């Protein structure tokens, strides 16, 4: 993977082809692999959808050349879209709830995007509403809307999924990934289930999130520190297809925090809380396979580490759990 051995003409050409690395803390007979999306130029998996969505929207005429894209985002999608927008001749405005990472907002601004904050209490729903209001006020402005745009899922079906299966010669037994918009898991799952219909697909959310209710699991809504995955309103997460998902794993913040610190100190991965949660869930699935509780086509589990811990240093991500301001 990461096969950029020759010079390229644009930063957009460096997106994707990220490494797939084995994790060492799991059952001996079931291998766990993580896709390291920090190797993208904007240091997150959202670079994939930034490029893919905007190129397709320009091709289809959904946005005019020189137009404006306005996106409600917690940050990483904004960075990915900002990188692509500038290279493709588009202006970018991002609507971000106040509580989200200041590092992400600074990076979006550095990429020549405009940032508009909305109240934390209004959540992503408030940011979505404000984005559409702004689009109505401006000429040649559109809202890609990552939470509802099928191109989000398609990006991972066309890129992330095939990369995983190519790296492992198709030997994938289970796919485990965090769900924010759900585009990542849905795209990989669609591709994986086409390769083998018995592939186990597991979603990951923080405790306090409500994705599990869609599969009939009991969930108690609450606040959580883990950033970038989870939902308080499944109606805003239109891409999540329960028909593709076998299980939803709720991971406590403390477990995600312990794991992200372990991943750094023991395995050299400087990853964020969503990756900590994904790793916890991937190990759960691996143990189920090892114990004979899950019948899968191959004794391998693949997960995704979506972004870097450096985005959250101002929130004390490596301090004690009590000091961590998620």
Image (spheres, grey):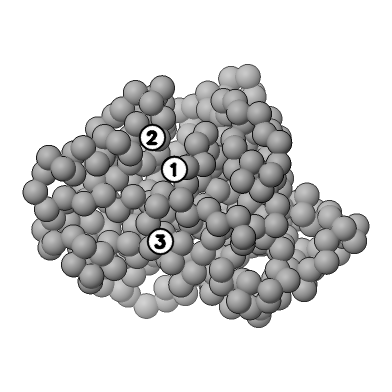
Q: Which mark is residue 274?
A: none
Quadrant assignment, res 137: top left
**Residue at the left extreme, as displayed:** 139
Give the x, y percent position of residue 86.
20, 56
Separation of disc 1 and disc 2 at Cα?
7 Å
| Label whose residue precedes the other's in the sequence (3 or 1) | 3
* Residue in the picture at 65% in, 43% down: 212
Give the x, y percent position of residue 123.
41, 30
Q: Nearer the viewer, residue 10 or 287?
A: 287
SS type, badge 1? helix
Mark 3 neighbour density, 10 Å: few (under 14) some (14–19) many (20 or more): some
Mark 1 neighbour density, 10 Å: few (under 14) some (14–19) many (20 or more): some
* Residue in the picture at 32% in, 62% down: 53
**Circle 2 residue:** 125
Quadrant assignment, res 85: bottom left
The relative height of residue 282 versus residue 209 in the rendered view (above or below) is below
Q: Is residue 204 visible?
A: no
Give the x, y percent position of residue 237.
47, 46
Separation of disc 2 and disc 3 at Cα?
19 Å
**Circle 1 residue:** 236
SS type, badge 2? helix
* Residue in the picture at 37% in, 78% down: 6
**In the drawing, does residue 68 fall left or right of residue 197?**
left
SS type, badge 3? helix
- Residues marked 1 and 2 touching at CB (< 8 Å): yes
**Circle 3 residue:** 150
Separation of disc 3 and disc 1 at Cα?
14 Å
**In the drawing, does residue 48 fall left or right of residue 136?**
right
* Residue in the picture at 49% in, 69% down: 157
């Amino acid at each position: 993977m990461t096969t950029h051995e020759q010079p390229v003409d644009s930063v957009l050409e460096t997106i994707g082809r990220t490494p797939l690395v084995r994790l060492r803390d799991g059952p001996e007979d079931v291998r766990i692999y993580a896709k390291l999306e920090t190797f993208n130029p904007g240091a997150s998996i959202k670079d994939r959808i930034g490029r893919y969505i905007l190129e397709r929207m320009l091709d289809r005429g959904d946005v005019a050349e020189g137009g404006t894209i306005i996106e409600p985002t917690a940050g990483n999608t904004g960075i990915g879209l900002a990188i692509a927008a500038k290279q493709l001749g588009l202006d970018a405005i991002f609507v971000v709830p106040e509580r989200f990472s200041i590092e992400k907002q600074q990076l979006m601004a550095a990429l020549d995007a405009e940032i508009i904050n909305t109240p934390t209490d209004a959540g992503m729903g408030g940011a979505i509403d404000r984005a559409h209001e702004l689009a109505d006020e401006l000429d040649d402005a559109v809202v890609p809307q990552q939470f509802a745009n099928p191109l989000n899922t398609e990006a991972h079906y066309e890129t992330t999924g095939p990369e995983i299966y190519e790296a492992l010669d198709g030997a994938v037994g289970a796919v485990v990934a965090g769900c924010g918009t759900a585009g990542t898991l849905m795209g990989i799952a669609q591709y994986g289930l086409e390769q083998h219909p018995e592939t186990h697909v597991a979603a990951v959310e923080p405790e306090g999130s409500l994705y599990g209710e869609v599969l009939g699991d009991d969930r108690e809504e609450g606040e959580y520190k883990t950033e970038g995955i989870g939902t308080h309103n499944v109606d805003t997460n239109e891409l999540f297809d329960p028909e593709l998902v076998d299980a939803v794993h709720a991971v406590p913040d403390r477990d995600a925090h312990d794991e992200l610190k372990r991943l750094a100190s023991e395995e050299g991965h400087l990853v964020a809380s969503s990756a900590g949660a994904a790793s916890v869930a991937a190990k759960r699935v691996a143990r189920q396979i090892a114990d004979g509780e899950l019948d899968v086509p191959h004794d391998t589990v693949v997960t995704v580490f979506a972004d870097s811990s450096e985005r959250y240093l101002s929130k004390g991500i490596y301090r004690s759990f009590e000091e961590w301001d998620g």
